[in-house]
Amino acid sequence: MRVVKEAEERKNEILDAAEILFVTKGYDGTSTGDILDKVGIARGTLYYHFKSKEDILDALTERISNAMFAGAKQVADDKDIPVFDRIVKCVACLKLRSDIGNEVIKQVHKPQNALMHQKMEKSILSGVIPIIGGLIEEGVSKGIFTTKYPLYAAEMLITYSQTTFDDKFEQTEKEMMTRIKAFIYHTERILGVAEGSLEDKMLGMFS
Amino acid sequence: MRVVKEAEERKNEILDAAEILFVTKGYDGTSTGDILDKVGIARGTLYYHFKSKEDILDALTERISNAMFAGAKQVADDKDIPVFDRIVKCVACLKLRSDIGNEVIKQVHKPQNALMHQKMEKSILSGVIPIIGGLIEEGVSKGIFTTKYPLYAAEMLITYSQTTFDDKFEQTEKEMMTRIKAFIYHTERILGVAEGSLEDKMLGMFS
DNA sequence: AAAAGCAGACCGACAGCCTGTCGGTAAGAG
DNA sequence: CTCTTACCGACAGGCTGTCGGTCTGCTTTT
């Protein structure tokens, strides 16, 4: 039997199904047929709403990123909270959203999901950097940080932590700890603050 | 007619063909049939030597990385050259190798080649970081640099520059320049040297 | 040195999957 | 009643990986 719905609604149904499937079986491991079955629609319907499988991935990536940034932006604009605390909260926002179930991350990093991984990473980076960059800028103008390039400082910090702390979670507890300590140490240098001054607050970011 | 060769030789023939094809048409855009045609062998032969298409990519990645590191390691061990110059030379080694034809890079960064890109990047990172890390360590022990975490300093510097200067070559000349300046500035901070002291030598790395 | 044996290299048909297309069909708004 | 929007499912075309069988040249045997 044929059920007709608004385009937006169907699109979201498809994205919902795709999200679950991509996350559990991987992008390459999921066939369009799987999505069809899960949503309960015919082949043609899917290609009526999306022009290709990759198009679905793009839409999904955008949906997820947008949700992530909504929270982070709100925090970033809350002038009542001290600048550095806002940075910590922003990062927490992103971390939270990115381990829905924890299985997700493991899946995303399997080689089959290179494309999904790449798109997510790119999308997250391009969204997060301006937010954090703005906060660092604010910190500089308030005399908390010192750097001639606040935006690029953010770029460096975020890019590094993204690839390193996401990709390399297959490391020992001990190595992870020194890596974190080193990261904090280098963050302090990049932001031009005293050694050890960020340690307490930043350690909380990795729990 | 049937031509029999040593397994190693055939494998290399296949990798030679794959290298050219992957680079010109992309990984996803290259079918095993393309490789078959180019080498002039039958389907079964290919799968006799490699267990899958991805297996070919892995072997190729390894072959390329190994070639890259051979040069870099040699430079790194040449104690006659000052430490910092060695770092510069090492980086040059890698850059050189990675723009065979320049078309390569453009190709590698197309979304179709996410898997190839990811594997290359990972392989390069894991090989380069210890080399540069060692050099920084040497610099620290000679009093040229100051950092408690030389290895992780290298990790941060290389990871960042890898993803940023490789991926984002679709930026304006001007933006690129400030990005480079900022990178040098942050490098100086991470390595604990005076502002501006690395500028002259490092600018040469991006030409 | 010829015959027989053998393992490693090679072949190509084929199964099975998967993506995207297209002509046609139902449903609800106007 | 009509027209747009959403939907359907058969089908073409392409791709990967498999498998039984074949060839080749080296080794062993006689």
Image (cartoon, coloured by chain):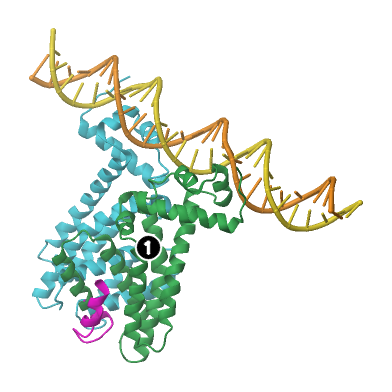
Chain colours: A cyan, B green, C orange, D yellow
Which residue is depicted at the point 35% across and 92% down?
Answer: B142
Q: Quadrant of residue A173?
A: bottom left
In the shown orientation, is residue B19 left or right of residue A94?
A: right
Horizontal relation, residue A157 to residue B6: left or right: left
Asked if B103 appears above or below A36 in the picture, the reply is below
Residue A138 visible, this angle: yes
In this rendered view, identify the residue nearer to me: B28 or A144. B28
Picture layout, residue A10 above or below residue A87: above
User: Residue B25 at x, y = what percent?
Assistant: 36, 49
Q: Quadrant of residue B69?
A: bottom left
**Relative image position of residue A22 (x, y in whole percent):** 37, 45
* Element at label 1: helix
Does the image show residue A107?
no
The region drawn magenta spans B186-207
Q: Quadrant of the N terminus of chain B?
A: top right
Residue under label 1, please give it: B121
Question: Which quadrant holds the C terminus of chain B?
Answer: bottom left
Specify the amino acid type for callout 1: Glu
The chain letter for the residue carrying disc 1 is: B
Q: Residue at x 26, y 58 (%)?
A: A94
Horizontal side of B22 relative to C15 (left or right) equals: left
Is B140 or A128 nearer to us in this picture? B140
Q: In the image, is residue D4 above or below residue A88?
A: above
- The stretch drawn in magenta includes residue B16: no
The percent coordinates of residue A135 (x first, y second) are 14, 67
**Residue C5 x, y percent position in the rendering:** 81, 48
Number of residue marks: 1
On whether residue B197 falls in the magenta region, the answer is yes
